[in-house]
Amino acid sequence: MDYVRLGRTALSVSPLCLGTLNFGVRTSVDEAYDLMDAALSQGINFFDTANHYGWQVHRGLTEEIIGDWFAKGGGRREKVVLGSKVCNSMSDWPNDRGLSMRHIIAACDDSLRRLRTDWIDVYQMHHADPHASWEEVWQAMELLVQQGKIRYVGSSNFTGWSLAAGQERARARNNLGLVSEQCLYNLVNRQPELEIVPAAQAYQIGVLACSPLHGGLLGGGLRKLADGTAVKTAQGRAMVAIETRRADIAAYESLCARAGFDPAELAQAWLLHRPGVTAVVTGPRTMAHLDAAIHALKLELDNDLLAELDQIFPPMVSQIPQAW
């Protein structure tokens, strides 16, 4: 595994980050344990979760599964760079959500308990909170760092201007600030190229690209729908996108067949080649999905192939005002 630095930090992470959204919901507990063991054995040391994952059963379930896995020992916790998130609602009570200082600190303590660990490596704000000032957010995060409960702070689903605002307020406080931004980024959704990636590059914030297959759509979605084997492609953002992008997906699957690439592997390999991307957050349901992600690390994409992908899924750089 060739490790990379997370943003401007000295922290080494694998360019594949194990996403755990499926754990306890679409993937059983035992399967989740096997996936984490397999990922770690392949050198994947970066795991990502969130405090509300598993909400279909109960909020916090996925963190509990990871915590039980850590408790198995064998240096599991020590080897893993762990990211979790805060902001989403954890109950119906008004202060059990958002980015108030009260909730950030209480949610961190709750996550540590579920994860059965003393620290979270990258504590991420899952969404921006329009009611929370950066002064309040940084005061909470600085306290958690001082207490040794978190090491770094990241964001998720933020805008480019939010990244800039957060970093400028952090600088004013002599604070390291954000080290990562996790965003929805894939061939179907190249919107982060407009402002998020440029802002992240300007501030040396690592970009973590999540949903690399756009909910399964880029993993041979049309073929799976035709075969009746689709799982994630038959729901969520994949089903929404397929209504308007069917021709593009058909062209992509045709290109993959002609070039001899597995669609899921090519989609993740493309992201691994993108400027500014530190890691791809892959969320396997099965061992085969994990194997495909690992194989994507080994793919070499030539300029002709990249140009064909740009023709099917045009870059959004032409929409940046400076390019007009």
Image (cartoon, rainbow, N blue to C red):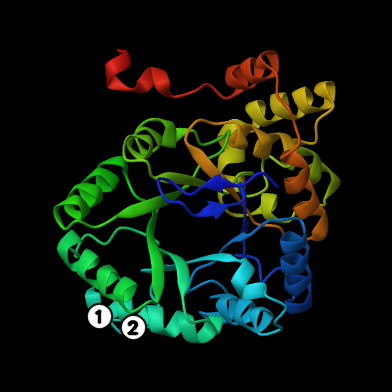
Q: CA distance from mark 2 to mark 1?
A: 6 Å
Residue placed most toward the observer, 229 or 310: 310
Residue 217: image quadrant is top right
Q: Would you place residue 311 above or below residue 40 in this image?
A: above
User: Which quadrant holds residue 99?
Assistant: bottom left
Please name the residue shown 64% across and 20% down the image.
306
Q: 250 or 149: which is nearer to us? A: 149
Residue 145's label in the rendered image is: none
> Which class describes the residues within 10 Å of circle 1: few (<14), some (14-19), or many (20+)?
some
For the residue pair 265 and 152, the one nearer the viewer reads as 152
Count of marks placed on residues: 2
Secondary structure category for the residue under label 2: helix
- Percent x, y for residue 203? 32, 40
Verify CB contact (< 8 Å) between mark 2 and mark 1. Answer: yes
**Residue at screen point 82% across, 50% down:** 228
Task: Name above or below for residue 219 compared with residue 145.
Answer: above
Percent coordinates x, y for residue 237 in the rendering: 56, 49
Whether residue 158 sits left or right of residue 217 in the image: it is: left
Give x and y (percent) for residue 188: 56, 35
Measuring from the top left, give residue 276's x and y in whole percent.
Answer: 47, 35
Q: Residue drawn 70% across and 47% down?
A: 1
**Residue type of the residue flagged with mark 1:** Arg
**Which disc is residue 102 wearing?**
1
Residue topped by disc 2: 106
Residue 68 showing in the rendered view? yes
Q: Is residue 220 visible?
A: no
Residue at point 68%, 13% (across, down): 304
Q: Is residue 320 above or below residue 270?
A: above
Callout 2 amino acid = Ala
Q: Categorize mark 2 by other alpha carbons within 10 Å: few (<14), some (14-19), many (20+).
A: some
Q: Secondary structure at mark 1?
A: helix
